[in-house]
Amino acid sequence: MTQDLDLSTTSSNLQLDMTTRRVGEASMYIDGKWLPSTSGETFATVDPNTGAEIAQVPRGDSTDVNKAVEAAARVAVEWQFTDAITRAGLLRRLAAVITEHTEELAQIEALDSGHYIAKARDLVAAMPLWLEYWAGAADKVNGRSITVPGNKFSFTVLEPLGVTAHIVPWNYPLLVMVRSIAPALALGNTCVVKPAEDTSLSALKFAELVEEAGFPAGVFNVVTGLGAEAGAALAAHPEVRGITFTGSTETGRLVGKLAAEHVAQVNLELGGKSPFIVLPDARLDDAVEAAIQGFCSHAGQICTAGSRLFLHEDIAEDFLVRMEARLANTKVGDGFDPSTEMGPLVSKKQMERVLSYIDIGKSEATLRIGGSRPKAADGGGYFVEPTVFDNVSPNARIATEEIFGPVTAVIRWNDLDTLIEQCNASDYGLFAVVWGQDITQAMTLARRLQSGNVLINDWFGELPMVPHGGHKQSGNGREEGLEAVHGYTQVKHIGISLDPNPRDSADWIQAPL
Ligand code: NAD
């Protein structure tokens, strides 16, 4: 009978061979063991540069989720009362181990997610910042003392939630995972991660490094599988006390409902349709470069994508001519070619979704740049050209729905109040960017835009100390910054009477029962 067999191995077999672009057997990491799925089922993960299979990944389901949550629950109290300095030391050790394995991790991330290799290296090299930031916070997160009437002492402590679930999307698999597990672990929670089905491999490699750093078994676990199976089972598990979900607004609603069934705390980091606004006095070459980053970074698969490009009508034409010239020289291609500036979309499904929005755009607006698949796509990869639509109505589908590809919609404007109204006429409110020299106009926009983040004359560079999150249907809670403490702790109040005869001064004693 299979359930009596111990199928675990003592080490992961995740070895990447870059000549074949294949990865050895992938196993899940549960309770310090490397395991296949209990059902024995697997699914394929592919290289989006070519469409070829990289590996088979265990298709975990509710049975595997139960094992992982039980392991995390078993060690939760011990981990909570492990000295904060010891927890911080392990996070720092993990940061050092990641640095030693940067190239390996970057190659796996690039191969599985389609980030081009130089970007993947930068992302991996940045990860220690998050681990060190939260290692530093581990022994500095305190409650407060409260002044109360009478001879009493009253104070709060911030306690970990217990077992936390981390459901991760495919666009920034390592970074999105690390930015939530770092505070969770630092503040005394144990973790179960569910990576996205298209990009599970880097979380498994990361788990090897967690093991090497010396974290106790059960404190950190990874269950791979499909969203509707493993993801839903994890969000629904009654012993999961906190859920950080990063992904689409649609799935976020489902996860929120599952969390409500067992009253788990939930952080939702969801989608966006962010305005990128150019004022008439902006430095155009800088603004063009930032706008391109805004909708082409990781082929537009970025939650903060500036996919509504609001150009003041006085500079719109000049701006677009400069943008055309810059994009004509942008190299789209295989992420392991060092000259590549933009890689593929993560999957065939995502590519088809983006191409269908390009078709919609062709019927709603003027195609100005791109709109097809580039030559690089002949090799089977999921490439789409950077695409710009001009003269877009603010109510058009390409101006209101999140496309999650290298596509932007230009809306020309001439009146600040109308601009603000149009920017805010969105269900989303994740991010906004303003380029221009007029600080009064820029700050008026910053104050009036309904958005969790506003940048002026800058483009996105995520940082561990800056709170990130959305207004409206872009989410709730905050990742990063000290604000994230609230997502991974709960308040306990402790009150003590200091009266030697508490009955003499008690206000509760006269109360009728
Ligand atoms: P998605 O919602 O399809 O999937 C995200 C994760 O949820 C995956 O791990 C998936 O397996 C899991 N999942 C799917 N169905 C589930 C279910 N029924 N129950 C539980 N889990 C389930 O999102 P995606 O397509 O992987 O990622 C793209 C989306 O993520 C975009 O909307 C993007 O804007 C958003 N995103 C937001 C942020 C942010 O910080 N706000 C960051 C990155 C990505």
Image: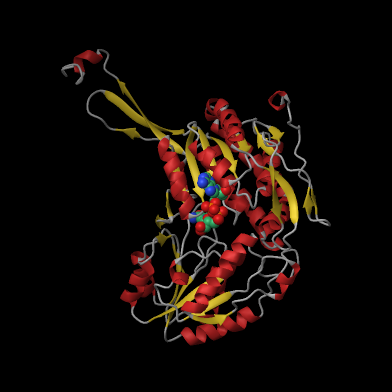
Left or right, 433 with reference to 135? left
> What percent of the width, then of the height, locates residue 148?
25, 30
Q: Quadrant of the C terminus?
A: top left
Which one is nearer the viewer's eye here, 394 or 446? 394
Which quadrant of the figure has residue 185?
A: top right
> Which colour assignment does the render follow?
secondary structure
> What percent of the width, then of the height, locates residue 2?
71, 27
Q: Residue at x 45, y 54 (%)?
A: 469
Q: Quadrant of the N terminus?
A: top right
326 w.r.t. 17: above or below: below
97 w.r.t. 87: above or below: below
Which one is nearer the viewer's eye here, 174 or 199? 199
> What percent of the width, then of the height, locates residue 94?
66, 41
Which one is nearer the viewer's eye here, 254 or 123? 254
Q: Residue at x 57, y 75 (%)?
A: 387
Which one is nearer the viewer's eye here, 451 or 57? 57
